[in-house]
Amino acid sequence: MIKNIAAQKLTQTKYGLGTLNTLTTFGTANQFILERSFELLAWYEDLLTINRAQSQVLAISMAAGKKPVQVSEPVYQLIKMAVTASQANFGFNAAIGPLVKLWDIGFDDAHVPSTTEIQRCCKLIDPTQIQLDDRNFSVYLPQPGMKLDLGGIAKGYIADRIKDLWQAYGVSSGIINLGGNVLLLGTAPTHTDGRWVIGVQDPRQPRGINVGEVILPACSAVTSGIYERSLKQNGRSYHHLLDPRTGYPLETDLAGVTIFAEKSVVAEIEAKRLFFAGQPLPNWLQSRPGLLGAVFVYQDGRVIPVGVKLRK
């Protein structure tokens, strides 16, 4: 009997980017590719992290108010993409680092800051102040205390780069799962139509519990929701998605929104756009290339799909 080689898979899970990452390739027995993929992930984490003693992104923040910092081209291009999205002022903000650090939700010293602290901090998170030099790949934060934070976009960017690596090695099908940010490559080897069955996370439930499934060709699925990290203090719960316009966690009826897009970094940005919008946007699918759809899940249990069919 002939084996279905295309359906045979290799899977490996490692910790990185503050989460568990699982990479799965189909149709190859070459463990080397997965090892190189995790090396690439670690390399980008070294460049982009703000949770270690040094990185290229951290060096920019440490030089705030002093001088521009030259970075490598991939770091510069990611920062430029993040700054461009931030300056559109829909909620995503690459300059939000000081506010994130002030609240520190998800870490041991998390607390609800005072109004004075928040007001002072909000003066340091204006993304229009960030100065980019395309000729020298340099970034300047003009005010002391400003900090970059690419946490809302980095995983999607790294997933896209792992996909590039797999295609260079000739991998035709696989799953890149970076802590719940999923990128699918090629055709699904176990389905005759080649499409993938993608579970949509229920943001009100523990990870892995879905509100339903969608069936789509290869794409990325990214969820923004209030379920990932929270702070409980004085009888109130504060989620980690901070609104740069107020300095507080965003007040919303949404529990979360899942975006389906061809590129994972685009799905990251659009997940923030729709989460901050709190509802479907007119002509959203038609206005941007590479988008496949979205699923909104509200705290009262309502589920609204946009551009996709949800199978329960």
Image (cartoon, rainbow, N blue to C red):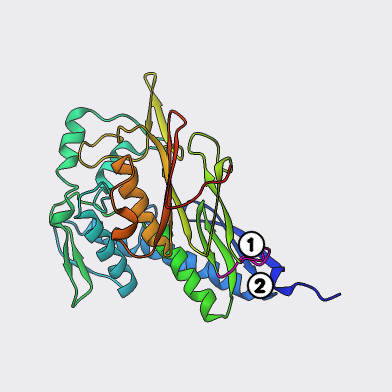
Which secondary structure class fits the magenta region best?
loop
Amino acid type, mark 2: Gln
Locate residue 82, reporting x and y percent: 28, 59
- Amino acid type indicated by mark 1: Gln
Residue 12 is tagged as 1
Rendered residue at 67%/75% (across/down):
28
**What's the CA distance linking mark 2 and mark 1?**
9 Å
In terms of depth relative to the viewer, which is nearer, 286 or 245? Answer: 286
**Residue 54 location (% of width, % of height):** 35, 60
Q: Is residue 149 above or below residue 73?
A: above
> From which residue to which does the magenta span run?
186-193
Q: Residue 31 shows which numbered tag?
A: 2
Looking at the rendered structure, the secondary structure element under dot 2 is: helix
CB-based contact (under 8 Å), mark 2 and mark 1: yes
Helix, strand or loop for disc 1: strand
Q: Please tell me whether residue 191 belongs to the stretch shown in magenta.
A: yes
